Image: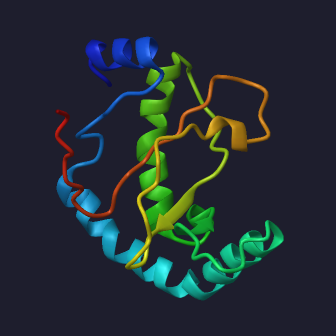
Amino acid sequence: VLPPETLLDFERHGHTVTRGLISSEDFASHVPMLYRYATEKESASAAHAASIMSAQGMTDLQPPFLQTFNPHRQCASAWRLALALLSAACALLGAERVRLYQTSLFWKRPGHDSTAWHQDLMTAPIATNDFITAWVPLHRVGCIEES
């Protein structure tokens, strides 16, 4: 269950931060399996990124990240983490149930640039605004202080 201030923040701004949906211990137990899965898929992900960039005429650039699609289908840890996030999605959308559209595992190799703030809805072939994207870092992320 999400606190009312989180629900209000999401309603007002279209995004919010939720912490504590997954215990630190439970999350930590899944991270090694996710890293192992990413390592196994790295070559295929790099080839996919290169083909996408080549098709767009960007053959001289490095991809900004690597990605594998739907790891929840082959990696039990990805499935368990997705399930843990679905109840939060229900609460944020005010829905009794939701459908899992996709899971993705993104990772950056040394030298990859940061990713700018963006919206994912336009990349999905879905005609609705009732769509949730959850971002879960697998390592501690520092805070950028605003001036």
In which image quadrant can residue 47 be found? bottom right
Residue 144 image position (x, y, % from top left): 21, 45
Figure check: 94 above or below 101? above
Task: Please tell me which residue lies in front, 121 or 39.
Answer: 121
Name the side, left or right, on which 88 lies relative to 18. Answer: right
What quarter of the picture does the C terminus occupy? top left
In which image quadrant can residue 33 be found? bottom left
Q: Residue at x 48, y 62 (%)?
A: 78
Figure check: 73 above or below 101? below
What quarter of the picture does the N terminus occupy? top left
In which image quadrant can residue 71 be found? bottom right
Q: Residue at x 60, y 69 (%)?
A: 68
Q: Residue furthest right?
A: 55
How many marks the image carries: the answer is 0
Q: Residue at x 79, y 27 (%)?
A: 127
Residue 53 image position (x, y, % from top left): 72, 71
Scheme of image coloration: rainbow
Task: Please tell me which residue lies in front, 91 or 141.
Answer: 141
Figure check: 136 above or below 44? above
Task: Please tell me which residue lies in front, 1 or 52.
Answer: 52
Q: Residue at x 42, y 77 (%)?
A: 109
Figure check: 26 above or below 39? above
Name the side, left or right, on which 137 lies relative to 61. Answer: left
Name the side, left or right, on which 57 lies relative to 31. Answer: right
